[in-house]
Amino acid sequence: MDTIETVLRDVPLFGGLGSAELETVAGCGSNVRFRSDEMLFRDGDEAETFYVIRQGAIALEMFVPSRGPVTIETLEAGEVIGWSWLFPPYRWHFDARALSLVRATGFDGACLRGKCEADPKLGYELMSRFAQVAIERLQWTRLRLLDVYGYARVD
Amino acid sequence: MATHASTDLREPPGPMAPEPFRVSRRRRETRDTWTLEFEPVTGVPLELAPGQFTMLYAFGIGEVPISISGDTEGPLVHTVRAVGAVSQAICASRPGSVLGVRGPFGNSWPVEDARGSDVVVVAGGIGLAPLRPALYEVLRRRGEYGEVALLYGSRTPDDLLYRRELERLRGRFDLHVDVTVDSAEGGWHGKVGVVPKIIGGARFEPDSTVALVCGPEIMMHFAAQALLERGVPGERIFLSMERDMRCGLGHCGHCQLGPTLICRDGPVYRYDELRELMAVREL
């Protein structure tokens, strides 16, 4: 059976990290599973964990009064969900729902923050990686803001 | 009595004269988009190639360029989004109505040249319509290609074209179909996100892949970037461009794109040849 450290080697977020660093990160992780439709977390809950999805898909949602849950984005195997554990007030800003059976590795945010504070080099590496994920998601969000399919050349 | 030079009615009509085509079938795709099938009133079918377009004429209203969206070995099929007076009139044409058709015009997707390669079809919105004939062609000779993927994005689930056909295609073992929408509310269990993002999840060998891309220009720009990042060379990425095509013959100049005329030199361009033109704001 693969250890968490072995699994992390194939996750783009951790690409290029050395064995010692991977071992340190893996020490804060544990394997978890969610049934289809189960909530991983809800808007306003304390953000103690982030997840690396190993199998299945997750919807990031926001509940809009009179419309119900609106899906903001879906995430799949190999992707990471959650960065609210990095910054105060450590609260989730969205809901996250499993769209299918999801197998993931969950990481204890407080554990990882502690290790990052103790080892600034590791902290920098992880912060850089999460910033890259955040920037990529921001770029895709900006593209969606353009509503590219909503406009057409009028004849 | 003065004499006048008269038109010889025995002369065949020129390329500016529309041929009458009768609407034989009409199907609603989305709230504003319809697919129409045509049969030639003269009985003479058109010779079509995937990627080409015709000038479709609603008599007394006007003419618009519309891509071929059906199997090129079958009848003429167009999928039209009602966004103006002409396209609204075309979409409202019931079976039995007669419209004018000129063409087909333009070049085609490099389906022949892609034999032996993986093929990735990337479509956004109504951009799936011009790509559908190419996909049919590839699937008809499936054994001559490597991996084949269809990656399609639309605004919402209700805006997906050819919904039943997409579901049927997803059932094939020799085709990877991935669909995403920009936003969704309850009842949608598929992906939410932009189409360039799902390029990363498709299986293909980048350096032996031919990518065919069609959609809004900004979407094509980001899709081409995502393909380049995956390692697909620019000369193997093909985009279909749209401008104000009018004559279809390269005479009027309305569809000029830099040194090219889309109706004559396009609408399909290689990305490495198009890249600089796409960056010019005035074009």
Image (spheres, grey):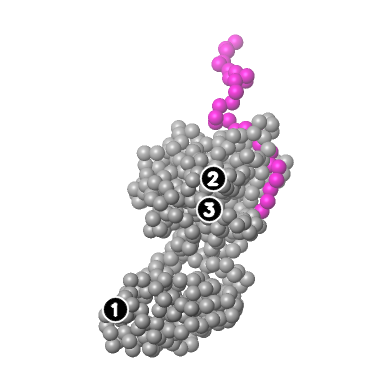
In this rendered view, identify the residue nearer to me: B13 or B167: B167
Image side of residue B35 versus residue A55, left or right: right
Which numbered disc, 3 or 2, marks the residue closer to the eye? Answer: 2
Instruction: Look at the picture and state if A38 lies above or below B270.
Output: below
Compute the Cα span from label 3 to label 2.
Answer: 11 Å
Query: Label 3 sits on what residue type?
Result: Val
Dominant SS in magenta: loop
Query: Label 1 sits on what residue type?
Result: Tyr
Query: Label 2 sits on what residue type?
Result: Glu
Q: Is the Cβ of the residue at disc 3 closer than 8 Å to that at disc 1?
A: no
Q: Which mark is residue A124?
A: 1
Q: Residue at the location (48% across, 41% down)?
A: B113
**Label 1: chain?**
A
Q: Residue at the location (36% across, 81% down)?
A: A23
Residue B18 in picture, x, y percent from top left: 60, 33
* Number of residues whose C-alpha sits closer than 10 Å to that of mark 3, classed few (under 14), some (14–19) or many (20 or more): many
**Label 2: chain?**
B
In this rendered view, identify the residue nearer to me: B246 or B259: B259
- Let me know if residue A47 is in the magenta part: no
Tell me the SS state at disc 1: helix
Q: Please name the residue that numbered disc 2 is placed on.
A: B144
In this rendered view, identify the residue nearer to me: B279 or A38: A38
Q: Which residues are magenta?
A: B1-28
In this rendered view, identify the residue nearer to me: B251 or B189: B189
